[in-house]
């Protein structure tokens, strides 16, 4: 494992080989693989010791990713993305044929989030595709809010670990399911609250 303090060619090359890397996001440190170069997210489940019944969301670099990888997108999903991206909101939508089966949930959906933070967005842009990402910690353990909090067991199993030297807020993203119709369903509340979402949609005349 190599640590570096800037988005490096090493990290990009590792992702393009289908390997896992660690990098900072605006919420926590993430553990990810390229959705184009890795055949599946299996390595993430192995490293994290996470149940494969829990889908892994994608980090994307623009709102247009909703159309690139989703279908039957309700207008509420666009409203939420325009208001809260980049930021700590994961939006689940129905996936189209561009999403490989290995990355689909059992319901045929995919979760997407546009993160804040230069390193994450730069990596995605340079890679040219989303990064399937989960928090960089053993399942059930605390999120890593700084590079020093990353567990040695995690670090030993990735090719490259990036650091920006900053301490993260440590709160995972809010997750809303927009695959069930016009009205999103809150699955996990983070810094963006149910009230925040309801207020926004009410102003947009979507509730």
Image (tube, grey):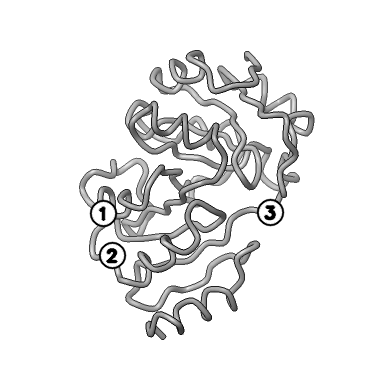
Assess whether mark 1 and mark 3 are in contact (beta carbons under 8 angstroms). Answer: no
Q: Nearer the viewer, residue 177 or 24?
A: 24
| Quarter of image, res 182 | bottom left
Q: Give me the C-alpha separation between circle 2 and circle 1.
A: 8 Å
Q: Position of residue 128 (x, y in %)?
A: 33, 31
The secondary element bearing badge 3 is classed as loop
* Residue lying at 51% horizontally and 26% vertically, measured from the top left: 20
Of callouts 2 and 3, the N-terminal one: 2
Q: Position of residue 94 (x, y in %)?
A: 30, 60
Of callouts 2 and 1, the N-terminal one: 1
Q: Disc number at residue 146?
A: none
69 displayed left or right of 55:
left
Q: Give me the C-alpha separation between circle 3 and circle 1.
A: 27 Å
The residue carrying mark 3 is: 171
Q: How many residues crowd mark 2 within 10 Å: few (<14), some (14–19), many (20+)? A: some
Q: Position of residue 98 (x, y in %)?
A: 23, 43
Q: Disc number at residue 67?
A: 1
| Quarter of image, res 154 | top right
In the rendered image, which quarter contains the C terminus?
bottom left
Assess whether mark 1 and mark 2 are in contact (beta carbons under 8 angstroms). Answer: yes
* Residue lying at 62% horizontally and 35% vertically, measured from the top left: 24
Assess whether mark 3 and mark 2 are in contact (beta carbons under 8 angstroms). Answer: no
Q: Nearer the viewer, residue 138 or 181?
A: 181
Vertical position of residue 143 compared to residue 157: above or below: below
The residue carrying mark 2 is: 73
Of callouts 3 and 1, the N-terminal one: 1
């Amino acid at each position: 494992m190599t640590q570096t303090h800037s988005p490096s060619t090493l990290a990009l090359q590792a992702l393009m080989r289908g390997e896992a890397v660690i990098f900072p996001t605006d919420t926590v440190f993430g553990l990810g693989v390229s959705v184009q170069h890795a055949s599946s997210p299996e390595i993430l489940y192995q490293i994290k010791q996470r149940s494969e019944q829990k889908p892994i969301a994608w980090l994307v670099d623009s709102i247009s990713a909703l159309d690139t990888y989703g279908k039957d997108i309700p207008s509420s999903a666009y409203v939420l993305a325009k208001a809260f991206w980049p930021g700590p909101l994961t939006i689940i939508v129905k996936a189209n044929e561009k999403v490989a089966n290995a990355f689909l949930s059992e319901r045929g959906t995919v979760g997407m989030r546009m993160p804040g933070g230069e390193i994450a967005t730069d990596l995605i842009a340079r890679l040219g595709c989303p990064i399937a990402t989960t928090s960089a910690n053993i399942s059930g353990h605390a999120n890593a809010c700084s590079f020093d909090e990353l567990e040695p067991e995690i670090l030993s199993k990735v090719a490259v670990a990036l650091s920006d030297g900053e301490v993260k807020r440590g709160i995972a993203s809010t997750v809303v399911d927009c695959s069930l119709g016009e009205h999103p369903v809150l699955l996990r509340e983070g810094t963006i609250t149910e009230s925040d979402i309801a207020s926004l949609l009410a102003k947009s005349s979507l509730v």
